[in-house]
Amino acid sequence: MIRFDKATKRYPDGTVAVDELELEAPTGRITVLVGPSGCGKTTSLRMINRMIEPTSGTIWLDDTDTASMPAHELRRQIGYVIQHAGLFPHRTIVDNVATVPFLLGTDKKQARSRAMELLERVGLDPAFAKRYPAQLSGGQQQRVGVARALAADPPVMLMDEPFSAVDPVVRDQLQDEFLRLQEEFGKTIVFVTHDIDEAIKLGDQVAVLRVGGTLAQLASPAELLSRPVDAFVAGFVGRDRGYRALGFAASGELPTHEEPTVTLGRPAPTEADGDLVLVVDDQRRPQGWLDVRRDGRPRDGDAVVTEADLLRGGTLATQGGTLRAALDACLSSPAQRGVVVDGEGRLLGTLTAREALDLIEGPDRTRA
Ligand SMILES: Nc1ncnc2c1ncn2[C@@H]1O[C@H](COP(=O)(O)OP(=O)(O)OP(=O)(O)O)[C@@H](O)[C@H]1O
């Protein structure tokens, strides 16, 4: 557990970056600090490992006042990941990861073999191990940065905008892998970002700070979306928050209807109840929709269904997933019927947007 107890940082020029901050980051959970530029996120984070010393107040690491420990000892327990990864440019990837355990006295061979293991865990091909940081893409470097911070196996990790220098697709992958790793490692993480969507995706709890370094709200993502405490937080949390909050609401058992299908590679039907018929593969996994009256003419009865015939675009809802996924499947479906699949991606049936809305408005829906 990390606890800010009236922690204040006043820089020598008089700027109060953090003002009597009270905040607790629980053990084994991800706490995200989010807020507009200059609200004191980085200053707060760096006060934890004493790269910045608080002017007043106390920061506790479990039962210990961090000011009472030698800084090097404190940092041994705290991994630190920053934007652009901050790798040593003249060391190979494997040695970047192995450096800290090696400095802490682990045998070199053992440190390297653990580094190789970690590189694999963060999703990096072992072939990259012998390269230098400049020979890796930004996203790959970020993975190395995460592996390096994990190498010393610290109970606490501080992460300052670690994924913001990469494109949105890679960023999304890094976030997913980060969550997967956290499930396995269960570190106490304080994560700084200016991106509210990232905060909501990653945080077990989210602390919204305002300029001047005060806490505006500390809440779970679902609560932040459904109950922002004031206009500042509501504005910061942004648009579509009602819809985004559905991403935290379990759909329960989705009521589905049987949906007629045609199999990819088999003859296409010349008629269907509507114009569109659902296409599945031989495992009954939905692939897209077929317009049986394409160009206004019925299809040739001998034609088989090919990938090129498919209308895609509809998202799939998984049974037992979220209300957001269920509604999105309905709204994005070219056939106005949302496709529901099981955990293996096999078709269970379809439902309409009206039915999804009934679930959203239903008496059973527990509000966050
Ligand atoms: N060394 C310093 N001396 C004086 N003021 C500083 C110093 N470092 C930061 N500040 C000021 O403290 C405030 C908080 O800065 P900080 O970097 O903690 O904010 P932040 O929320 O991380 O911002 P950003 O999202 O833009 O990175 C800002 O007004 C900043 O200008």
Image: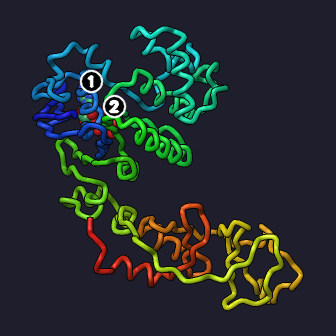
Q: Amino acid at mark 2?
A: Leu
Question: Looking at mark 2, is its residue's CB closer than 8 Å to ligand 1?
Answer: no
Q: Decide if residue 12 is in sight here.
A: no
For this rendering, which residue is in front, 57 or 328? 328
Q: Which residue is mark 2?
A: 158
Q: Residue shown at 18%/29% (left/top)?
A: 62
Q: Residue shown at 66%/83% (left/top)?
A: 260
Between the C-alphas of marks 1 and 2, the distance is 8 Å
Ligand 1's image quarter is top left
Query: Which label was assigned to residue 338?
Result: none
Q: How is the image coloured?
A: rainbow
Q: Amino acid at mark 1?
A: Asn
Q: Position of residue 113 (x, y in %)?
A: 55, 18
Q: Position of residue 297 (x, y in %)?
A: 81, 89
Around disc 2, counting alpha carbons within 10 Å, would you say few (fewer than 14), some (14 to 19), or many (20 or more)? many
Seen as rendered, the residue at the extreme right is 302
For this rendering, which residue is in front, 279 or 298? 279
Q: Position of residue 24 (x, y in %)?
A: 19, 39
For this rendering, which residue is in front, 194 or 123? 123
Relative height, residue 127 to residue 214 (above, below): above
Q: Decide if residue 335 is in sight here.
A: yes
Which quadrant: the N terminus?
A: top left
Which quadrant: the C terminus?
A: bottom left
Relative height, residue 124 to residue 110 (above, below): below
Q: Which residue is mark 1?
A: 49
Q: Residue shown at 23%/60% (left/top)?
A: 228
Question: What kind of element bears circle 1?
Answer: loop
Q: Position of residue 367 (x, y in %)?
A: 26, 69
Residue 82, picture quadrant = top left
Q: Residue shown at 30%/45% (left/top)?
A: 34
Residue 338 horizontal side relative to residue 20, left or right? right
